[in-house]
Amino acid sequence: MLRSWRVKLKLLLATVTLAILLSWLYLFMGSLEYGRFLLLPPCLSEQPSRDVEREALALRVRRVEEENQQLRLQLGQVQAEGSDGGPQWGASAEDGDPHGGERSNRTACPKQRMVHKCELLHIAIVCAGHNASRDVVTLVKSILFHRRNPLHFHFITDSVAHQILQTLFQSWMVPSVHVSFYNADDLKAGTCPSFVSWIPNKHYSGIYGLMKLTLTKALPSNLSKVIVLDTDITFATDIAELWAVFGKFSDKQVIGLVENQSDWYLGNLWKNHKPWPALGRGFNTGVILLLLDRLRRLGWEQMWRLTAERELMSMLSTSLADQDIFNVVIKQDPALVYRLPCFWNVQLSDHTRSEQCYTEVSDLKVIHWNSPKKLRVKNKHVEFFRNLYLTFLEYDGNLLRRELFGCASLPSPPSNQLQQALEELDEDDPCYDFRRQHLTQHRVHLFFLQYEFLALPDPTDVTLVAQLSMDRLQMLEAICKHWAGPISLALYMSDAEAQQFLRYAQASEVLSARRNVAYHIVYKEGQFYPINLLRNVALANTQTPYVFLTDIDFLPMYGLYDYLRNSIQQLELPQRKAALIVPAFETLHYRLTFPRSKAELLSMLDMGSLYTFRYHVWPKGHAPTDYAKWRTATVPYRVAWQPDFEPYVVVRRDCPKYDQRFVGFGWNKVSHIMELDAQEYELLVLPNAFMIHMPHAPSFDISKFRLSAGYRGCLQTLREEFHQDLSRRYGAAALKYLTAERSL
């Protein structure tokens, strides 16, 4: 310690001496030049004595600078002898500073290796379930916003998060971003030493909070290093800066961690508080740098397992999941850890010392919401941190699809095909905007809220399928009250609107009580409402054998779910190809006493408080249902397809998809019913089923259809192209549709 202070004192004196000499040299040279300018003619040479003086002074300055550099080197060596890593945030017994060696981010640090702009950075994240998948998206946005390097995300997931994140990244199509998935179920149990299911854990993260211990086994054997992040992290800088810290590890260091900023491991939070053993304040594992190749050579799997087994004999279970085990391993071998500066993991749990990690906004690198309270945590600057988090939460992810200039990357086959299709479009085509919208790649976040998957669906079970935008949210509670069965909804929203919807659903007693409603977010992009894409997303993510294809502004009759299941069984639908038609009605009243039976509905129909759907605007759409026959029908009856028929039907889940060229208003359902008929589906009207359309303001797309002749002209063009495609797929049988269209 005394030696360190002596070197520091010498360095200070040398620095002062150098400053004085440089000032003297500056003034001396200035006076020479100034005197020469005033007194000497331009052609007159300087006096030799002055040349000698300047050379002597310059030589002395160089010597002092060399001594200064030597002293800095000695000081660095002395500091290295008393430290296992880089600048520390935590307490240091040697220097007596209760706040550690790093009081702010402006402490001078050794020069570190720069990261090449095209170097691939590897990031590992454990993610399980619906909520964690949402958190991951915000984390990824914050990383993509700042990044300048290609990235490879390694996700250790359960089956739910795998499906959600795989679909999200495939539809996001961010350049120079690679994604790999690893099945967490394979790491839970078994005979391999790396499995973790045997470890009792009290932490709210459950068994997934232990998965980071298995990364040397889970990740590819040729992967040498990785940054490991919790899902509740927000980046405020380029992650390449953190990656560069790997270059500062000594030969023995294998793990980079920030010291824990709470008193948890000091054991003084409450009476009889007994934490796991840790080095000093311990370390937080929300941000980890792992040198995987060195860990494998050290036998990491056996090391942590034997240590955990020994401690569990007295501790019985972990309280902070993997963090407890990482800490006890480090305590028995402190040389393994590189101490990251605390701004790489500013921990926002209650009663932490996180405020000592920063003095200005520019100091922040990584924010860690590691309290169960998350955004409600107590912190003097929590409003600032919350706003930073909300910025990325609601940030338009489409804006992050930017290329990395100067880095060659191989685009994926879907990206190549999409680019080729876009290049083939004719911008002078009057219908260019329609064709461009059809090719738009929308980001899709499946199962945005908690959803309980069916272990074994009933063979007659049916899911209500619909789509909506923000202006139809008010229909959700009413539909849930009318339909008890599973529901699959595609919601067309911006990133900010998706968060508004999340708050709405969580605050609703009706919606929050349901676990069989699947919400799939399709993020906004383009000028048209992609109605058939939305329907296909909702349809593709159903689990039941049958689906009820409806629209969000219809309320099904009470008990329709059970009635449809009985009808499917009675009509032996599994053995036939049929579409069951649910007759549609409408009301012009915003407040309606909903009919409880067919008899009540017929009475209201006769009194004029209900109407057959669109009879006064678009009678062809539902006239083939034959409402006159339905009034007295007691058994299902068959109807024939007619032009422009667009009923709401119950079909098998493997029915044809909706044609996505139809966007906005017009022909989106008509084309689907036409294809069902082309595939020889029977059209059967159910005698005791009905649904009622509720009034609402006209959509933006129907207004464009009514006001724009160009819009209607393009719709006609798309219809003709659809007929041609139908003829190619179904041959001569499809000619009747074109003939019927022309006869109208």
Image (cartoon, rainbow, N blue to C red):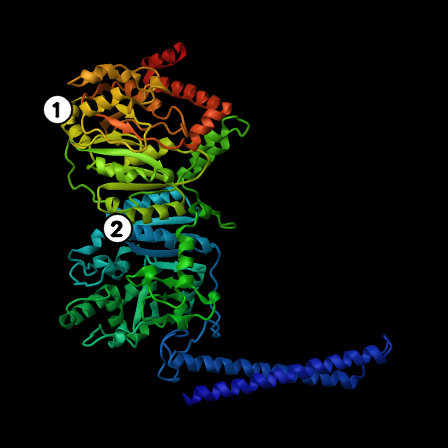
Which residue is at a point 42% across and 28% down the rendered structure image? 702
Question: What amino acid does circle 1 point to?
Answer: Gln
Q: Which mark is residue 41?
A: none
Judged from the image, the secondary structure of the residue bearing numbered disc 1 is helix
Residue at the far front: name it. 607
Judged from the image, the secondary structure of the residue bearing numbered disc 2 is helix
Image mark count: 2
Give how far across and how far down residue 388 sits, in percent.
42, 58
Q: Which residue is mark 1?
A: 570
Separation of marks 1 and 2 at Cα, in angstroms: 38 Å
Mark 1 or 2 closer to N-term? 2
Quadrant of the frame with the N terminus? bottom left
Q: Nearer the viewer, residue 517 or 10?
A: 517
Give how far across and how far down residue 31 sits, in percent.
76, 81
Give how far across and how far down residue 565 sits, in percent.
16, 30
Quadrant of the frame with the C terminus? top left
Q: Is residue 653 visible?
A: no
Quarter holding residue 321:
bottom left
Q: Which mark is residue 129?
A: 2
Question: What amino acid does circle 2 point to?
Answer: Gly
Which residue is at a point 24% across and 59% down the rendered structure image? 205
Residue at the far top: name it. 743
Looking at the image, residue 634 lies above or below residue 398: above
Local packing at callout 2 (Cα closer than 10 Å; few below 14, some 14-19, many 20+) is some
